[in-house]
Amino acid sequence: MSNALSLLLERLRDKEDEARNAYLMALESERSFKRQLDALNQYRSFYSSELTNKGLQGPVATSSYSHFTSFIGRLDKISQEQLDGLRKVQGETAKRLTFYQEIQAKRKAIEFLIEKRHQEKLVREVKQEQKMSDDLATNRYFKVHSGGSD
């Protein structure tokens, strides 16, 4: 039984390592999405500021205004797609974290069970040694007392 638990524990540890690595990869992917989204938003902010600055300097040509607003619109669309992707990745990251925590809990439960059985075995061994010691002492007592009356 103990071998089966040890084997199960070993497999759970391997699975836990895999789950942790998958979670860390998802977390890194999430960070990457966030960095890209931040960069897009900064880029959009820069172009919006450029349009505002040009407007403050004087009239803006229609073609220039159209170019800026079109480009900012495309950045908005790309940012929205990036945000949607980020939300999807965040959902995947949450799932992987939950799975990792479930495997971790199972591993801890098996470790607890193995330790509990080990402690129970030690208690049984101590009791058995005590019983043997008591039996030996009893036998010696009877030998000493029965040997003197013969």
Image (tube, rainbow, N blue to C red):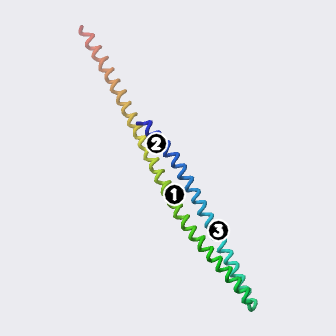
| Amino acid at pointer 2 | Leu
Q: In this figure, which residue is indicated by the disc labeled 1? A: 96
Inspect the image, locate mark 1, and give the three-letter code of the amino acid beneath it: Arg
Q: CA distance from mark 2 to mark 3?
A: 42 Å
Mark carried by residue 134:
none
Badge 1: how crowded within 10 Å, few (<14), some, or many (20+)?
A: many
Image position of 148 with respect to 68: above or below: above
Q: Is residue 20 above or below residue 137?
A: below
Relative to 18, residue 135 above or below: above
Answer whether labels 1 and 3 touch (C-beta < 8 Å). Answer: no
Say what amino acid the circle numbered 3 marks. Answer: Gln
Q: Is residue 29 left or right of residue 117?
A: right
Assess disc 3: are there few (<14), some (14-19) or many (≥20) residues with their C-alpha within 10 Å of its C-alpha: some
Residue at image coords 46%, 39%? 6
Q: Quadrant of residue 36?
A: bottom right
Q: Earlier in the sequence, mark 2 or mark 3?
A: 2
Residue at the outermost right position: 57
In the image, residue 2 lies at what x, y percent?
42, 36
Q: Which type of secondary structure does the marked residue at label 2 adopt? A: helix
Tell me the tag on residue 36. 3
CB atoms at circles 2 and 1 under 8 Å apart? Answer: no
Q: Secondary structure at mark 1?
A: helix
Q: Nearer the viewer, residue 142 or 79?
A: 79
Whichever of labels 1 and 3 marks the residue nearer the N terminus, that label is 3
Query: Which residue is the site of mark 2?
Result: 8
The image position of residue 104, as x and y in percent, is 48, 50
Ranked by sequence position, the earlier of labels 2 and 1 is 2
Please provide percent x and percent y for residue 97. 51, 57
Quarter that holds the C terminus = top left
